[in-house]
Amino acid sequence: MIELGSYIKLQRTKQEMTQGELAHGIVSLSYLSKIENLKTEASPEIIQALCTRLGIQIDNSLESTIQEKCKEWYGMLFEVNDKEEITSKFKEIQSLMDSNLTESLLLFEIHKIRYYLILGEFDKALNKINELNEISGTFDNLHLYYWYKFRGNYNSVTAEYNPAMHMYRLAEDKLNRIELEGQEIADTEYAISVTHSKLRNTLEAIDYAKKALDTFMKHYNFVRCAQCHNILGISYRRIKMYDKAIKNFNLALHLGKLNNNKQLIQLTNQNLGHLYSTKGEAKEAIKYFQEVINDEEVHLVERVAAVASLVREYYNVYNFEETKKAIKYGFELLDQFKNIQQYKIFDYVLHTYDYLLREEHTKFENLVIKEFIPFLEKNKDFANVIIYADLLAKHFEKQYKYKDATKYYKVANFAYEQITNI
Amino acid sequence: MKRFIAGLSLGALLVTGFAFAQQNDPVDLSMDREPSVLSIKQPTVFF
């Protein structure tokens, strides 16, 4: 049974009505407060009067229709769908919710967090979290499961991986108290595996990706399988099991092609490029990065990331002509971003190598010391701190500035310790 | 002079230590691209 108090509070705040406005002539303000906070159960007459003022029907003849529509919409939030389709279905359900008292309301409100995240409206997702937080004490186990999971999703997309993992763990703890479909559980396992991968908990990432993959395979969900294979590929590369990594990336490529999913194909190519880069096979690495760059259907950000990798690769094999060309192309792509701040890292990478090649030592040192390394440290991107502190230290060594070189080898060493948790 | 030599030695020690660590441990020096935790069909042409 729906908690009527929570429902009334939600509808009142949505309509931007004060407690006084709603209570006026029906109940006292303090009594309404008690109803909303589930401290008392109001009579059916009072509920009827409050709902009438809110413009809501208590008639539940549409309950099964609403439930069906919600189920369909929830499914859309987990599968690959057009944003327009999801939004149109959302609006349809919202108008039903606005005029009917339904048991589906709380779950619908919780799913809005995921909905806003998919649309990229992170502020709205956070507002929804804050709004629901006030009534989260009334959630049952099913509500709590999604509440924790979507808060984890919010932390994932805002790159706060430790809080994300905490939320996913809480959601996982609820799994044995509720009944859910296999693919829903697999989706949570997949989110946990991605988060472990971000936190560089390699063995755990493998464990959860395998669990999720097993379920997705049974449901022939090729896109999700390919995503799991990518996590496995990254993880096996990190523990230097290159053959297994390549096998997983190739499976991801195959499944991406079956589904004609360009984003997934090029994501895998980028990861394959990195694999060959870490193996020291520059020619192969360059081949994969070029594939990403040349695909105009793929997101601009992925192409810029590939250019940044390509710049590093060419520079490391002393092919300075190609490095210059790649830098120039990278700047051209960066110019197309409306909001450069979001992709600042690529701007730093391109400028770093640009100054190095032009032998503009002061500019190079100022950029890396005063801006780039602090930026990476702030974002806890220790892998890149190692790369650029090492690059800077080598530069100082060449200039016979051993004291400065030592300082930045130390910075690199510290970042290395952060990664390996020494 | 003594300080210079000491500084140089420390530098050399750190360089060696760091290089050794790099050779013997699986340090991850690349930018991996994990897939998103969310799924959504993206527009075919981005810009």
Image (tube, coloured by chain):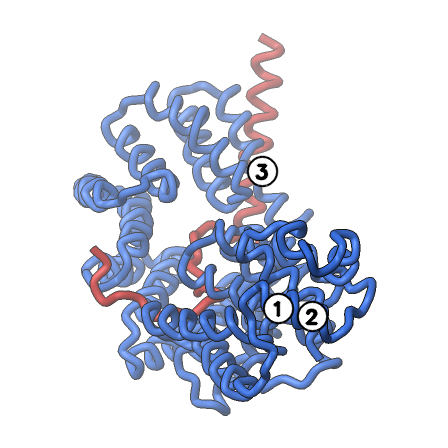
Chain colours: A blue, B red
Residue underneath mark 2: A47
Q: Nearer the viewer, residue A294 or A33?
A: A33
Q: Position of residue A140 (x, y in %)?
A: 73, 73
> Residue at the spot x=22%, y=41% of the render?
A335
Count residues near mark 3 (Cα–Cα under 10 Å), then give few for <14, some for 14-19, many for 20+.
Answer: many
Q: Nearer the viewer, residue A86 or A277?
A: A86
Q: Position of residue A171 (x, y in %)?
A: 67, 69
The three-letter amino acid code for the residue at tag 1 is: Cys
The residues bearing labels 3 and 1 have C-alpha atoms spaced at a distance of 64 Å
Residue A345, quarter of picture: top left
Is A401 rendered above or below residue A323?
A: above
> Residue at the spot x=50%, y=46% of the render?
A383
Q: Position of residue A405 (x, y in %)?
A: 49, 25
Q: Describe the element under mark 3 as helix, strand or loop.
A: helix
The three-letter amino acid code for the residue at tag 3 is: Asn
The three-letter amino acid code for the residue at tag 2 is: Ile
Asked if residue A41 lies left or right of residue A26, the reply is right
Q: Is disc 2 in contact with disc 1, using a CB cutoff of under 8 Å?
A: yes
Which residue is the extreme one toward the front? A25
Q: Describe the element under mark 1 as helix, strand or loop.
A: helix
